[in-house]
Amino acid sequence: MIIVWLTLALALVVHEGSHYVLLRLAGLEPKPSFHFPGLGWKFQTQGATSRQLIDIWLIGPIMEALVWASAALLFPARAWELLLVMVVEMATNLLLPGSDGRRALRLLRSGQPLSAPANASAGAGQPAAEAVAAEAAREHLAGR
């Protein structure tokens, strides 16, 4: 069982670290955001394209899945436990309101071209990506 907990800690570090690296590569200024249930990064979307935001939101879950899959390969006796936790983690990272995957899905559904700057008008004077991020944050805090 200790392998699962160690993998969970490593997965969290890799997940958040990959967000940070991609934020920096995109030229955005990440600011740590400590909120329940975990860590996160707040950042300005000025100058980022929709594609960059989607990449930033999805890199964490992708890298986390790689950590879980690698642990399952390294520790075959615990593979079923590790893969089960991976499935649960991916579901929370991609499906829950306010999660990385839901934010990316909302931006994709907004109809904004991926190459367009994220601050392209989305109506009501608020940039599309910023509106998506703000709504996802409200959902996350409300627990919906």
Image: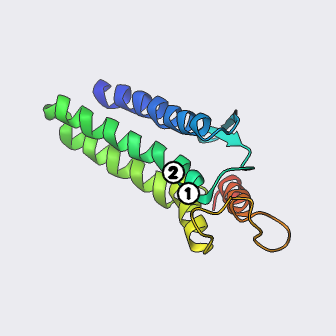
The quadrant in which residue 135 appears is bottom right
Residue 21 falls left or right of residue 66? right
In the rendering, at what x and y percent does residue 29 appear?
70, 35
Position of the C terminus by quadrant: bottom right
Q: Is residue 99 visible?
A: no
Residue 23 falls left or right of residue 1? right
Q: Which mark is residue 51?
A: 1
Under tag 1, what secondary structure?
A: helix
Under tag 2, what secondary structure?
A: helix
Query: Which colour style is shown?
Result: rainbow
Give the residue displayed 61% in from the left and 56% down from the top. Answer: 98
In the rendering, at what x and y percent does residue 64 appear?
40, 40
Q: Is residue 45 visible?
A: yes
In the rendering, at what x and y percent does residue 57 appear?
54, 50
Give the residue displayed 59% in from the left and 52% down from the top. Answer: 53
Give the residue displayed 47% in from the left and 45% down from the top. Answer: 59
Q: Are marks 1 and 2 in contact (CB under 8 Å)?
A: yes
The quadrant in which residue 41 appears is top right
Instruction: Pick whichever, 19 or 113, lies toward us.
Output: 113
Residue at the spot of label 2: 55
Position of the N terminus by quadrant: top left
Please, what is the three-letter code of the amino acid marked with disc 1? Arg
Residue 89 falls left or right of residue 70? right
Give the residue displayed 68% in from the left and 39% down from the top. Answer: 28
Instruction: Pick whichever, 48 or 11, lies toward us.
Output: 48
In the rendering, at what x and y percent does residue 13 appear?
48, 29
Please, what is the three-letter code of the amino acid marked with disc 2? Asp
Q: What's the distance in space between the residues labelled 1 and 2, CA to CA?
A: 6 Å
Give the residue at the far right of this rendering: 125
Local crowd at mark 1 within 10 Å, few (<14), some, or many (≥20)?
some
Local crowd at mark 2 within 10 Å, few (<14), some, or many (≥20)?
some
